[in-house]
Image (cartoon, coloured by chain):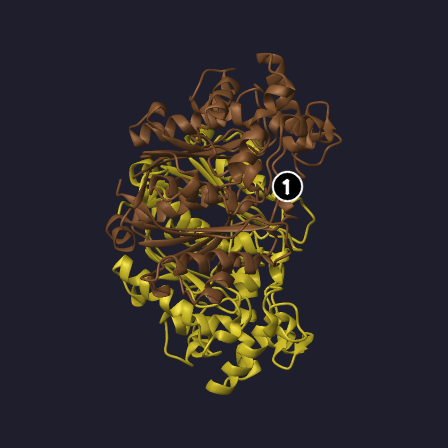
Chain colours: A yellow, B brown
Amino acid sequence: MPKVGIASYGITKFTKDDSKIESVLLKSTKNLFDNNPNLSRNDIDAVLVSTNNNSKYLSAILSEMSGIEPKIAHSIESLCNSGTNAIVSAYSYIASGLADIVLVSGAERYDSPGQILEWDNSRGEFKHPIFWASIFTKAYKREFSVTDEELAIVPVKNHKQAQNNPNALSEKTYSFEDVINSKKLTDDLRLLDCSRPCTGGASILLASENTCKKFTDVPIWITGIGQKTTSAGFTKNIAFSSMESTHLAASTAFKMSKCNVKDIDVAEVHDAFSVCEPMALESIGFTDKGKGMDMIKELHITNNLKINPRGGLIGSGHPLGATGIAQTIEITQQLQSCANKRQVENAEIGLVHNMSAAATSSTVLILER
Amino acid sequence: MPKVGIASYGITKFTKDDSKIESVLLKSTKNLFDNNPNLSRNDIDAVLVSTNNNSKYLSAILSEMSGIEPKIAHSIESLCNSGTNAIVSAYSYIASGLADIVLVSGAERYDSPGQILEWDNSRGEFKHPIFWASIFTKAYKREFSVTDEELAIVPVKNHKQAQNNPNALSEKTYSFEDVINSKKLTDDLRLLDCSRPCTGGASILLASENTCKKFTDVPIWITGIGQKTTSAGFTKNIAFSSMESTHLAASTAFKMSKCNVKDIDVAEVHDAFSVCEPMALESIGFTDKGKGMDMIKELHITNNLKINPRGGLIGSGHPLGATGIAQTIEITQQLQSCANKRQVENAEIGLVHNMSAAATSSTVLILER
């Protein structure tokens, strides 16, 4: 398969502000162009927008506002996994030869309609994703004898790491006590266990091998792609303490990239809720089943930034359509050694894990310098 | 580029009924599987949903309801041009090697939010697309001295042709007098000049060359693809009497397919309003500027079904997300010589033209037997 690389990127600060979706899209796109003065509007063959916003024709609107007249232009939606779906789509346009340069721009507002999946009637009294996060947490705690106090390490670590991410929503660190004493939402879930919806945008530019090298001295290549949808309603899952779609997506991505989990120097994983981080690490294969919290504890104690250096979703905030793109930008910056205080030393191979709706679908990308 | 073909399809009747969007998606998908008993749910690598509906995660929902567990799954939106965008995306997944078989399912309800582009402030007092259709009609009539009576041929012809389309919304023919005497919506637009939003679904299965041949004895190949977005708000157009994005998309598609407009035996063009049919024919190159109505008159008098044999959007109805897919199914059936009473004799090369929002974006596909 021809090589496809990341040629540029742009991002906004994640906030709780009331900006229009078009403005958020434009802002990160403008930042992308500002970061790469050699890039012309005329170079861009396709504009893919990733969002759960109900507004229509946003790819054409962003194109007009940015001065781009692309061949291909549409919006892509798959709940939280929209951004990585759009990146994979951009990859396929380039690998197929239908496009040479593709702009992928993701944006969401704090009041995204993607937070509630009306179709899933299994959620009982809770409309928001806390319904499945509670069941996941209870199942995980029971199966692996993990306590609330142990899980609290995830938000403590990720809020701390977010303090070195200038675009993060989180503006302070929290202690274990803060997490445990934060508002109890359900038997198994506290407010600080949850990532927060917010307003934010992230844009990334993908290009074919030769073109990519024109726009950056340090191109980052997408060498592995894995995606899997196992269901839409989460009660079709067999296990609530692991992520089957993540496991399958990771296997496919590793196979394509010809590297394995031991080669990964840095990863962004989808910590929508505390319990998701250990579950994701286990399902990807970073550690054995039930050992995710041991790994996270060790990383936390040793100040090792390997997992979610930008603060993950819990620290950075979670603007759904932008999240997968922001994760990919973080890994790109890590592999380009320009992540400043968040830098993982000698990072050469990175991984992005994104998912939707109780891990009923997942995407795993492998990026290499 | 590797060959990508159409391996199967399914469609629903276009109606004014109140079905849920999930049911409409499932119905045409079920029809597709019924049409191809050799096809297994496990064969499908990607499920792309085309719609303007506000419901989220529809690709995963359709997958779960149909028993598919795809790798790639997301929704695609680009107003009326969504269906052909999804087909091109499916093509790129297969041509890139990321997928071998892709299901594209389009659906819309009669009350689609895609009918109104809130962002476009140029529409004045009219919220619906009649605002641009009126300006197009006035500009076209003025520039080429065309009368309302002449334009009325388009709905007369297309409602007539729709009577041989068992899935069409239209259930009767109309005379010139019926069109001229139908409710006047604006100075230049009558009710029967307009296609009608409706509830409908259409699904199509794309596959790589060898796989395609396993599922059908008469594979139809997508040999040309052209897409262009010139703007989002229609007042950025230079001319209101031609479709620049259509012209550019057609040029690209012809170039890729290595055939030209004279080779086209049958075409579906986007007649959202009467004036769109002659404008589209001229912009694609079937005839000279201002000569579209002469061509349509000639076809109508001689009962030549070459343009919009299924009745176009005016005759078939216009369920936005399904339209581009239904157009592509029609051309597929024509090239497979199974279009029954709608059959254009000896059709070997066909064209699909789809567009959005005053032709601010267009897709042109060339299909060959």
- Where on the picture, by quarter, is residue B266? top left
The count of marks equals 1
Q: Which residue is mark 1?
A: B115
| Residue at figure coordinates x 41%, y 48% from the top left | A89
Name the one closer to the observer, A59 or A232.
A232
Question: In the image, what residue occupies the spot 58% across and 45% down?
Answer: B169
User: In x, y percent, where is residue B132?
Assistant: 64, 28
Question: Is residue B6 visible in this depiction of the protein?
Answer: yes
Q: Is residue B56 visible?
A: no
- B208 relative to B127, above or below: below
In this orientation, which residue lies closer to the viewer: A185 or A45? A45
Q: Quadrant of residue B272?
A: top right
Percent x, y for residue B74?
48, 54
Residue at coordinates 27% horizontally, 43% vertically from top-left? B3
Q: Is residue A348 above or below residue B92?
A: below
Question: In the structure shown, which secondary structural element does the residue marked by tag 1 occupy?
Answer: helix
Q: Is residue A313 above or below residue A30?
A: below
Which chain is disc 1 placed on?
Answer: B
In the picture, the quarter occupied by the C terminus of chain B is top left
Quick check: A18 above or below B25? above
Q: Quarter of the image containing the N terminus of chain B?
A: top left
The amino acid at mark 1 is: Gln
Residue B47, x across and y down, in percent: 43, 56
Crowding at dot 1, Cα within 10 Å, few <14 / some 14-19 / many 20+, comes out as some
- Name the residue nearer the viewer: B34 or B95: B34
Residue B86, horizontal then vertical, whole percent? 45, 46
